[in-house]
Amino acid sequence: MVFAPPAPASVAVSGTFDRFPVRRIFCVGRNYADHAREMGHDPNAEPPFFFTKPADALVPDGSTIPYPPATADFHHEAELVVAIGKSGFMVSEDQAETLIWGYAAGNDLTRRDMQAEAKAARRPWDMAKGFDRSAVVGALRPGPVDKAAMIRCIVDDDVKQEARLSDMIWSVPAVIAHLSRLVELAPGDLIMTGTPAGVGPLSRGQICAVTIDGLGPAKVTIA
Ligand code: MN
């Protein structure tokens, strides 16, 4: 080794001192019909699609993060995060549940103006989605999550996003089944499962909290 490798990325496990080691972060685009429509797309037109963030873009609950460079339209996206605990390749929806280790609340922070430019120019989304400190993930809780749970994004005291997890176009098992046909899923993979309508800008000094019934929050302050 020409230098000491960095410590592996990890996420807190709620109620313990344990850490969940993170391998990769996959994200689903347009997985709630009302958000697909607000972004100008037909929610029924396409199968799920995926993009990624680097594991070291992770930010824990309670962090203060700087307003990122190269954007004037920095957006929140409240999302359910699935943690994968077992390997799986080309799994069925029925088998998909057995890969799940647990769940957390998350925020897929996005440079929306850069994403719009990338879409228009048919360029990749990496710099719009996978920048430093772009993946806020709260403490993981092992076991299932209530499919009727509410997901919310609260900026200062205003509820900006509010939906039921059951409003997802592609259920968690369907997302896992689709993704496992593209890559071999492995323990430590996280999947951010898409955001409901109401995405919007964050500004310096604001506090942005993603909450999901039964899970710990994913809250950040923008410095
Ligand atoms: Mn998203």
Image (spheres, grey):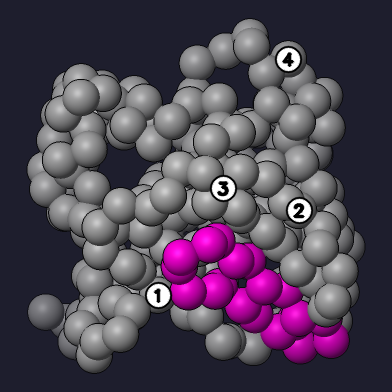
Q: Position of residue 26 (x, y in %)?
A: 41, 46
Q: Could you give the CA–CA distance between mark 4 and mark 3, rounded to whole angstroms?
A: 23 Å
Question: How many C-alpha atoms fall within 10 Å of the one at disc 1: few (<14), some, or many (≥20)?
Answer: many
Reading the image, the residue beneath label 3 is: 126
For discs 1 and 4, the disc positioned in front in the rendered view: 1
Q: Earlier in the sequence, mark 2 or mark 4?
A: 4
Q: Helix or strand or loop: what does disc 2 sit on?
A: strand
Question: How many C-alpha atoms fall within 10 Å of the one at disc 2: few (<14), some, or many (≥20)?
Answer: many
Q: What is the quadrant of residue 34 in the picture?
A: top right
Q: Amino acid at mark 4?
A: Asp
Q: What is the quadrant of residue 41 in the picture?
A: top right
Disc 1: residue Cβ within 8 A of ligand 1's nearest atom:
no
Question: How many C-alpha atoms fall within 10 Å of the one at disc 4: few (<14), some, or many (≥20)?
Answer: some
Residue at image x 22%, y 70%?
21
Q: Earlier in the sequence, mark 4 or mark 3?
A: 4
Reading the image, the residue beneath label 2 is: 161
Reading the image, the residue beneath label 4 is: 42
Q: Is residue 131 above or below residue 176?
A: below
Q: Is residue 158 magenta?
A: no
Q: Could you give the CA–CA distance between mark 1 and mark 4, rounded to whole angstroms?
A: 33 Å
